[in-house]
Amino acid sequence: MLATLRSIAESVSRQANLDSALVCFVQMVKDAMQTQCCSIYFADYSQDNFVLMATEGLNPDAVGKFRIGFTEGLVGLVAQREEPINIAFAKSHPRFKLSPEVNEEGYNAFLSVPVVHQKKVLGVIVVQQKMARVFSQDEESFLITLSAQLASQLAHAEIKEVLRQDESSHQTSVLKGVSSAPGIGIGQAFVLLPKLDFKSIELLKDSNIVEQRRLFTQAVAATRKEFNTLSMTLSDSIPLEALAVFDVYQQLLDAKSLGHNVEIQLQEGWCAKSALKIVIERLISQFNAMQDPYIKERAVDVKDIGLRVLHHLVNTEHAVKNYPPNTILIANTLTPAMLAEVPKGRLTGVVSVNGSANSHASILTRAMGIPAIWGIEDLPLLQFDSKPMILDAFAGRLYISPSQMLIDEYTELQHQDNLLNNRFLAEQDYESITLDGEHVSLLLNAGLELNTDQSSAHICDGVGLYRTEAWFMQKGQFPSQLEQENWYREVLTSYYPNPVVMRTLDIGGDKVLDYFNITEENPFLGWRGIRISLDHPELFLDQLKAMLKANMGLGNLKIMLPMISGTEEVDESLALIEQAYFELSEKYPEQQIERPDIGIMLEVPSSVFMLPEWSKKVDFCSVGSNDLTQYLLAVDRANARVAELFNPYHPGVLRVLNKIARECEQYELPFSLCGELGGDPEGAILLIAMGYRRLSMNLSSLNKVKWVLRRLSVSDMEQLLTDCLAQSTAKQVLRLTRNFMLEHDLGDLFYTPK
């Protein structure tokens, strides 16, 4: 049965369009279940009904025409319940609705399952049989499994079809993602090439057969050259019989083999990439169907050859591409290096298929003030290339090929947003003091952007989190102690005399070094942060000495230890810090080496319950609310599938943050917060009410938070906090905070387009 499931999934994925995919689907399901009818209905939310999209067994003339309401018939009941219905006599069910136009009168047995993707019912699959019987548990499980497997596939196929139809009719397409860095971007898509596979290639026609043949021939020639180079490189190190595989590859590339089949597809009007995709996927399917294991293994060779040719095809197309003036960067998975490659002033927005609004790459876009959307549906990225787009990162929407009316509307909204930001900037030099006289220190989260031009130093109260790992991530090897010392000295000097809290190397999770590969099944619960530093004391001591030397004559350094979970880690770290201090004191007896304050990040839940111990061992603590929220809610914050579950306004998270503030005050342990929550005006209000007086955030958030708190009193915030802590859901909390802001004439902050 597993082989059948895989076969259906693979066959559907190879179809050129949605219609053919659904026809293939119902035919294969009908044959696999040995039943007499299989149909699939898609939900049309614009008309609140289901439309028959494909069938094997019902009236074919009804396809695309027959519709049934969301609350009508057995199809509607399956969608309402979001669970299967399996009955022997469909007509005897009270919800049965006779629809003569589909010719289903002769069927009795009825089994139906919903197709659900990301909590949304996309459609309903129905199998029917003339003989009255209840389908077996195995048959029901098969259909449920098939629905679950193909839900996302069918969702993507549906969206691709909408994009294709909209393109041909010059209509605007809209895709939904997760808003990351707020704002509006209007520009042109620049797609960074994904890790190529044939799934990323959309089947497209091209009438210029001569040009497409030239591109294909050029790509084959480049692949031949590549194989010749590989063969020569390996000729001295592997046996001659092993080198024969390259001869086989060259034969497969021959005009009589791959070339002939691709030529047929080119003559039918397909572009070179599409023709190659059709031929390679067909060959792979044929080899996989063979019984002989040796022949079956050749499918791997065919795929490898096909991908190499594809790589050269795509590279040829992108060789002369330049970033447009208003670049909307689209990537499968965004990295800091990708952002750095865009020429200054050209980046208008960012769209990432994978990742989430809480990943470190997303945090970087907020630090840069670039509108960004995460978790867009997994589509063939190359289909978007060079298209005009509007990125609405307030609502998490991406408009493809927008109309001029929509562009004009968003241009005006962008103007209004800029006016609001100007109001924030007008008060950036003012003190961050509430209406009732409470001063709140607003500090910067810095380091990700590697920007040493600290022109913003005068508008903040220092740096609450300096991410030292950013420098390590830009290098091809571990930086020397001297290199680190120079980096740290520059930062400490830029913000002097204000404090700079430098976090020791915090790699692991979604922060990797190319030259220090860590492969783990669950990296966020693995070898990261202080765990790596303590396992490599030679690296840790180098970094500590660089920090201490950089601080000489300044004295504004504070050191913070990440990912602390127990006292042993603190004791070991303090011992190494002491060792670094004494070794430097011996080496530079004429210099005064200052002992900086040492703090820990509260981001592992166990650490929250160790505050009595921490108050005796360290000088301060800072809440890393991003990871703390992740671990409290058991949600991978870099996973787009569960992005909506990551919510720092969850009452459980708020109660923990409140507990930290109360206990830190009790034990007289200085505390702050350096997570993204502090940069959100509503989050900052709740934190100030809890007692947090030091909040660290991105530069783009600092002026906004300052502007808000200057218009509120702590006493009002405290009443809001009391109400919020009594709620049971994040939605209820956000409703209260939203109403609070509106009541205090801060509604402009929630002006969201569309």
Image: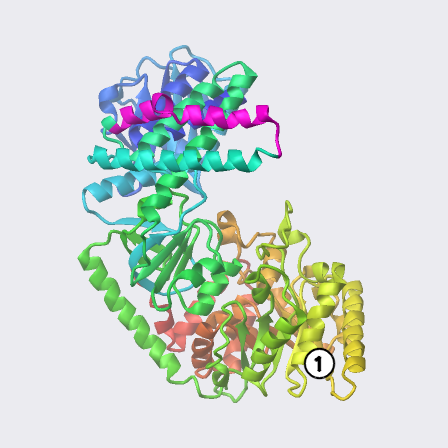
| Image quadrant assignment for residue 492 | bottom right
Relative image position of residue 183 (x, y in whole percent):
36, 65
Magenta: main secondary structure? helix
Q: Residue at x 31, y 42 (%)?
A: 45
Q: How is the image coloured?
A: rainbow
Relative image position of residue 250 (x, y in whole percent):
44, 27
Relative image position of residue 655 (x, y in whole percent):
61, 65
**Residue highlighted by disc 1:** 596
- Quarter placement of the C terminus: bottom left
At label 1, which amino acid type do we have? Answer: Pro
Question: For the residue carrying disc 1, how many other residues have a C-alpha within 10 Å: few (<14), some (14-19), or many (20+)?
Answer: some
Answer above or below: position of 703 versus 220: below
Relative image position of residue 264 (x, y in whole percent):
28, 24
Q: Residue at x 55, y 74 (%)?
A: 696
Q: Secondary structure at mark 1?
A: loop
Q: Confirm whether the magenta stretch covers residue 243.
A: yes
| Image quadrant assignment for residue 746 | bottom left
- The region drawn magenta spans 237-266
Q: Is residue 551 left or right of residue 269?
A: right
Q: Residue at x 42, y 24 (%)?
A: 252
Q: Depth check: 82 or 504 in front? A: 504
Q: Is residue 497 left or right of residue 370?
A: right
| Image quadrant assignment for residue 326 | bottom left
Q: Is residue 664 visible?
A: no
Q: Depth check: 171 or 101 in front? A: 171
